[in-house]
Image (cartoon, grey):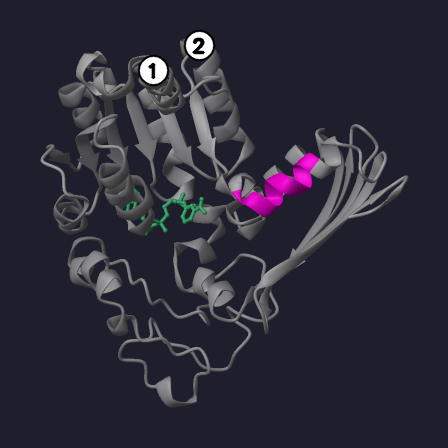
Amino acid sequence: MSSTPVSRREFLVGSSLIAGSVMGSRAFAVLPQVPRMKVALVGTGVRGVNMWGRDVVRDYPAEVEFVGLCDINPGRLAFAKDYIGVACPTFTDFSQMLETTSPEHVIVTTMDSTHDEFIVEALERGCNVITEKPMTTDEVKCQAILDAQERTGRNITVTHNYRYAPHRRRMKELLMEGRIGRLTSVDFHWYLDTYHGASYFRRWHGKRRFSGTLFVHKACHHFDLLNWWIDSEPELVYAQGALEHYGSNNDFRHTNCRGCPHQARCAFYWDINTDPHLVDLYVKNEQYDGYLRDGCLWSEEIDIYDKMGAQIRYANGVQVSYSCTTYSPYEGYRIAFNGTEGRL
Ligand SMILES: NC(=O)c1ccc[n+]([C@@H]2O[C@H](COP(=O)([O-])OP(=O)(O)OC[C@H]3O[C@@H](n4cnc5c(N)ncnc54)[C@H](O)[C@@H]3O)[C@@H](O)[C@H]2O)c1
């Protein structure tokens, strides 16, 4: 997706550095006031209220003004307004928020399978969109988004934040410098441990109709990294996965951990009440939508894969062996780039 070549913040920082060097200490007195970006956010869950909400309000008060917050859960929405620390109006209806507040940018942090409806509507109303990954969960929704972007000429930024880790940028630099000659293949294996990996199976992520499976929800980060590092596009993909650990692969289950009669014998028992932030966001607002954030990871309704593998051939000839395991004893990944003149 496209994004503006120079961000507003980069521009502001760059222009004030120039002004500062020319005018010394008088710079702040004479710099013109730039109007703040009018931003509305939909989806006030943990991601929305923290990284996109409270952190942005704290770090960019001169650049960003929140004009509206939206969520279908009115309890969570009320908590979010207070937690983020904004005075803007709140809405349970997205269209009404756009109509009332006329934002320039819309931030989408709802459940993955719903991103498309907010992206398309925001574009149609002339807004630019910043959406959490994955942009969407299937090819039909993806095409609808691409069509809307072309029709409206607005920008969509998909926040694949993994690219910005310093060590991953360094890998990109070394590849661009040709330190291993021409890249020929990549071995990439991702391990989620039994805390982080298990957490996906407790939440909406465990249903493919909401997350598109972890091949979409989680691996989109990994595939974004691969596309960027390899600097090409996948041409041929063979992939498979299976559910062999979580879901129906156990002989007892309950709806959720709180009140579960199997607590004492379940290795995955997790007490959400030990995390006050999650209690404020989710437990206290179950009455509005019935969403149990500590859902049973042995639920027979879980239909995503817990082990995944893919063989990918890129248009530039690079071959990739990829895998993701969600019940590893440790968290991390292994990656190797093989080239005509060495291995990184
Ligand atoms: N880039 C990353 O590293 C990263 C990390 C965590 C989450 N995320 C992404 O952020 C998004 C949110 O994740 P989360 O963990 O906060 O999920 P969450 O379930 O905690 O929050 C989603 C919020 O959206 C609301 N919502 C759902 N459907 C809605 C609708 N139709 N209209 C309005 N509101 C609706 C829910 O009530 C909830 O408050 C997801 O797309 C996820 O993939 C990205």
Residue 52: x and y, percent?
31, 40
Residue 195 position (above or below residue 313):
below
The amino acid sitting under disc 2 is Arg
Q: Residues within 10 Å of mark 1 (few under 14, many from 20)?
A: some
- Against 130, is 12 above or below? above
Q: Secondary structure at mark 1?
A: helix
Residue where numbered disc 1 is placed = 124
Compared with 220, 99 (above or below) is above
Extreme residue in the front direction: 24
**Position of residue 225 in the picture relative to residue 147 (left or right):** right
Q: Is residue 111 visible?
A: yes
| Residue bearing the label numbered 2 | 151
- Residue 334's quadrant in the figure? bottom right
* Residue at 43% in and 10% down: 153
Determine the secondary structure under disc 2.
Answer: helix
Q: Amino acid at mark 1?
A: Glu
Question: Could you say where residue 276 lies in the image, as x and y percent from the top left?
Answer: 22, 66
Q: Is residue 280 left or right of residue 117?
A: left
Residue in front for this viewpoint, 258 or 320: 320
Q: Residue at x 32, y 85 (%)?
A: 261
